[in-house]
Amino acid sequence: MNDTVDKLVIFLAKRDGIDKLVKTFQYVSKLVHWHAESTHPNMAQRFKQWEVASGLSRKAFRTGRFLTGFNALRRNPGTTPAFKFLAVLANAGEMVYFFFDHFLWLSRIGTLDPKLATKMSYISAFGESFGYIFFVVSDLIMLKQGLEKERKLLKEKKSDGDDEVSESIRKIKVDRVMRLMSVAANVADLFIGLAEIEPNPFCNHVVTLGISGLVSAWAGWYRNWPS
């Protein structure tokens, strides 16, 4: 049995693991900067620099990440025509997000024309938001199907008390938690994407962005933490 340190090492060895850690740094520093800006401007500036550096680091870590969506469609697009359709839309949006994020990163660090950053950010955020909508829809359908299957299994368990039935119910509950974490992360990231696509006082408020970023990061921690 791995202890906590073993699990942390395994977690940080994953690209998603280090991304969630740095994402936590990014949005904690964003909130600290906002809180300290008026009273401790020097400290606030340091945290702003940490936020920017964390955001740029995450973009570097995501190099080539758009291939994940492509491979998901190639290997396991879905079990039914409806899920295949949702998978194509969701992964297509995510591929656009990660692909154009490369150009956003390069323009932010000055390798490409910095003027491209605004356009690349919009395209990337649009693809991200588009994809997350369909990921959420797919997860909600799977949650509904899981609940229906669990009800049937509970009726079977009352009649014969089979251990296999109990194990099936346990697996459904584990899957439900993971899918709820996925929905939470995707909805939180959707708020961040909307702040870029259609700026508004609610989505663009620092507290909304900070909390959304941390919800997404910590849901990702839970999903990627070794069992």
Image: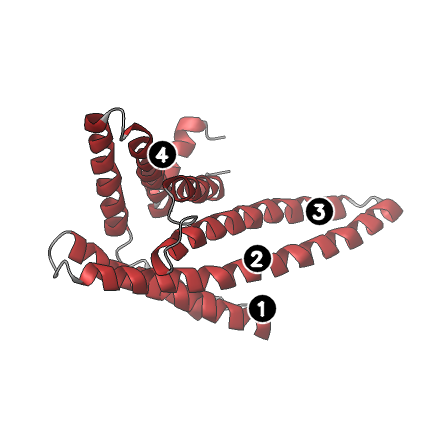
Residue 114 figure quarter: bottom left
Q: Residues within 10 Å of mark 3 (few under 14, many from 20)?
A: many
State left or right for residue 186 relative to residue 63.
right
Kindly report the distance in space between the C-alpha atoms of the residues bearing marks 2 and 3: 18 Å
Q: Residues within 10 Å of mark 2 (few under 14, many from 20)?
A: some
First along the sequence among labels 2 and 3: 2
* Observer-nearest of 182 and 13: 182
Secondary structure beneath label 4:
helix
- Secondary structure of the residue carrying tag 3 is helix
Q: Check whether the beta carbons of the residues at disc 2 and disc 3 lie within 8 A of each other.
A: no
Q: Please name the residue that numbered disc 3 is placed on.
A: 169
The correct choice, above or below, for 184 with respect to 207 in the image is below
Helix, strand or loop at disc 2? helix
Which numbered disc flags the more N-terminal residue, 4 or 1?
A: 4
Residue 75 appears in the picture as rendered: no
Amino acid carrying mark 4 in the image:
Val
Q: Residue furthest bottom?
A: 81
At x 82%, y 46%, the residue is 157
> Label 4 near label 2: C-beta < 8 Å?
no
Which residue is the site of mark 1? 79
Position of residue 140 measured from the top left corner of the image (x, y, whole percent): 60, 57
Earlier residue among tags 2 and 1: 1
Of the residues under marks 4 and 3, which one precedes in the sequence?
A: 4
Q: Which mark is residue 9?
A: 4
Task: Report crowding for label 1: few under 14, some 14 to 19, many 20 or more residues within 10 A (C-alpha).
Answer: few
Label 1 – label 3 distance at C-alpha = 21 Å
Q: Earlier in the sequence, mark 2 or mark 4?
A: 4
**Residue kind at label 2, given as amino acid type:** Asp
Q: Which residue, given by chain and number where applicable, does mark 2 sit on?
A: 139
